[in-house]
Image: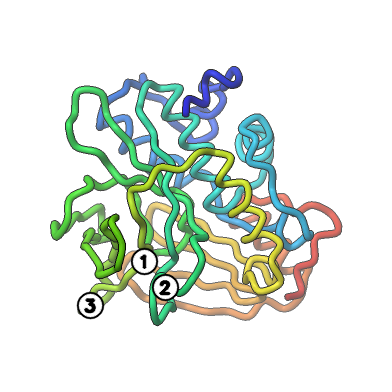
Amino acid sequence: MSYEKQFDFDITAYLHRIGWRAEPAADLATLRGVHRAHLLSIPFENLDALRGTAPSLEVDDLVAKLVHGRRGGYCFEQNTLLAAALEALGFEVTLLTGWVALGAEELTSRPRSHQLLLVGVPGDPEHHLADVGFGAAGGLLEPVPLVADVEFRTDRRLHRLVHAPRPGPLPLWQLEARTGDSWQPQVGFTLEPFEPVHMVTQNWYVATHPRSPFAQRLYAQRTLADHHLAVDGRQLVETGADGTVSVRELADEAEVRLVLDERFGIAVPEGTPLSG
């Protein structure tokens, strides 16, 4: 589905927000560069869910919030915005959904609660998996080709795609990240295409269901060039490029708000509960 036919997407403002200064083109170098720049510029956060509302996935609302406002978002927001930008630049984008594998004993025992993108580059027969909305340190810095059992290194991050067993007609793909001496599943997905309207119900579930972790406590993440920051409730977690992890308990809501402002670039709306 073409986003640019629905509204006038401000690609100039988007590229300025992510710090992209080169002339964009519908090629692999731009795809990789825009993906990385977006990830390094727009933080992951669930503040709307904490306020009891599902964030809007209308692209003009996402531009107001993530491009012009000092806010971030989670996967449905981040990847919807990236999809609109990529289509405006001339890429072919297919919306996918998947299962978060982190902490799951059985991947498909969870609902599909994650959005990803399959991106086609003009003139390139190979499609690429893109995802700027995973948030965690095991996520993709840059898109990877949709090829099984090949390792891809970006800076110090190492990923691969594998096929996982699953009954049914569609193969189950699984993105894995190398952690220490082992491969850790991050997210599983099939190549069934979805439309923006399908994301509305999944977004509503993630934001408002009583059992959704995003409706219960604060999650904020920011990927930087040499380390990764996360706030989980009151804990500030810093992961270095070498994998070292430090954890600090934040004293109170005031310190949480200060850290989000100064280190994540997030302006917390008044009335947002941060004590969970």
Q: Are marks 3 and 1 in contact (CB under 8 Å)?
A: no
Query: Separation of disc 1 and disc 2 at Cα?
Result: 5 Å
| Residue 195 at x, y percent in the picture | 50, 38
Q: Are marks 1 and 2 in contact (CB under 8 Å)?
A: yes
Depicted 13 relative to depicted 70: above or below: above
Query: Separation of disc 2 and disc 3 at Cα?
Result: 14 Å
| Residue 253 at x, y percent in the picture | 77, 70
Query: Separation of disc 3 and disc 1 at Cα?
Result: 13 Å
Q: Residue at x 36, y 57 (%)?
A: 189
- Residue 182, labelled with which disc? 3
Report which residue position mark 2 lands on.
102
Residue 260 or residue 8, whichever sits in front: 8
Kind of residue at disc 1: Gln
Q: Is residue 185 left or right of residue 114?
A: left
- Tag 3 secondary structure: strand
- Tag 1 secondary structure: strand
Earlier along the polypeptide chain: callout 2 or callout 3?
A: 2
Depicted 182 relative to depicted 125: above or below: below
Q: Residue at x 41, y 61 (%)?
A: 227
Label 1 CA crowd tier, 10 Å (few <14, some 14–19, many 20+): many
Label 2 CA crowd tier, 10 Å (few <14, some 14–19, many 20+): some
Q: Quadrant of the C terminus?
A: bottom right
Report which residue position mark 1 lands on.
186
Q: Residue at x 22, y 45 (%)?
A: 145
